[in-house]
Amino acid sequence: MSTSTATSPTRDALSSRAIDFASAAASAAAAVLPSVEPLAAGTPMAGPDDLRTAFVGAGLAGAAIAELEGPTGGAVAVLVGSELVAALSGSPLGGLDLATAVQPALDAAAAALDRSAGPARTVDLALVTGDLKGAYAAVPLLGSNVSAAVLVTMTALDHAAPAPAPASRGGVPGMRGLEMLHGVILDVTVELGRTRMSVRELLSLTPGTVLELDRAAGSPADLLVNGRIIARGEVVVVDEDFGLRITEIVDDAVAM
């Protein structure tokens, strides 16, 4: 898609202030969004009625949105292409959540507006504009073509801080496939064991109750990412905190 045909006709619909802040938010998001190539913010446009038409050729395949914290409200969304969606679904750690992968980009966009983003949630592309609940600005993120986009509600732009953050380029040249995900932050859980209980037993729990787990004392604990066991180890104490010393890396066949 040519950026001139997609963005020029609607640029005048945005004030210079909205253009500056939308560009700053998009540039901040581009710096941390997983991508196969460096990304830069394109020209902001007034929120189009049809995102797929506005970003023809972008191959948009997923979206995540976060509400902006504070009394003035607003929201920011990031639209991503099929390459990132495929990398997340094909991860050896199991299908990873798009919202988790995009949260740093949403946080960065919010910070450029002197705001904080709430927890991200994945939304259908067809529903994302409705979830923004109002007028918004759309900014394409450009590599060799349009690779992604950032949407920011006009409410957020109207109440942004006086000075937008400077524009910056993001991405790491040459990143392909799973390398796109190297910067994604994941929740890691250490599991000592499990048990099964009836609702009656759960409701009868009181302080001091001892639960017997399905693992013998001294057995290794499991290290889980996204619900999948990737390693086992022994529980240790590190500076008065619990830690896990890895003793075994679990392959996919064993983990299943």
Image (spheres, rainbow, N blue to C red):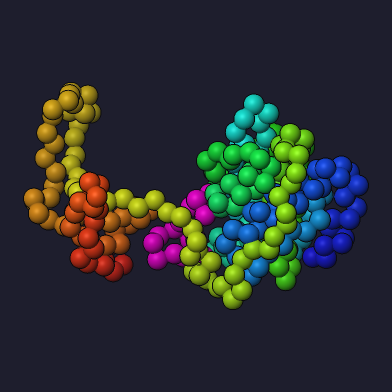
The percent coordinates of residue 26 (x first, y second) are 70, 53
In the picture provided, is 256 more to the left or to the right than 64?
left
Instruction: Tell me where residue 234 sits by quadrant.
Output: bottom left
The percent coordinates of residue 29 (x first, y second) are 64, 54
User: Which quadrant is the C terminus positioned in?
Assistant: bottom left
Q: Is residue 179 magenta?
A: no
**Is residue 147 positioned above or below 47 on the image?**
below
Q: Is residue 125 visible?
A: no
Which region shows up in magenta?
Answer: 87-101
Q: Is residue 113 visible?
A: yes
The structure residue drawn at horizontal position 18% and vertical position 42%, both measured from the top left corner, is 195
The structure residue drawn at horizontal position 67% and vertical position 46%, both measured from the top left corner, is 112
In the picture provided, is 151 more to the left or to the right than 186?
right
**Is residue 106 positioned above or below 248 on the image?**
above
As drawn, the residue found furthest toward the left would be 217
Residue toward you, 225 or 117: 117
The structure residue drawn at horizontal position 74% and vertical position 46%, both measured from the top left corner, is 164
**Is residue 163 positioned above or below 207 on the image?**
below
Instruction: Tell me where residue 8 sits by quadrant.
Output: bottom right
The percent coordinates of residue 44 (x first, y second) are 80, 51
The structure residue drawn at horizontal position 76% and vertical position 52%, both measured from the top left corner, is 23
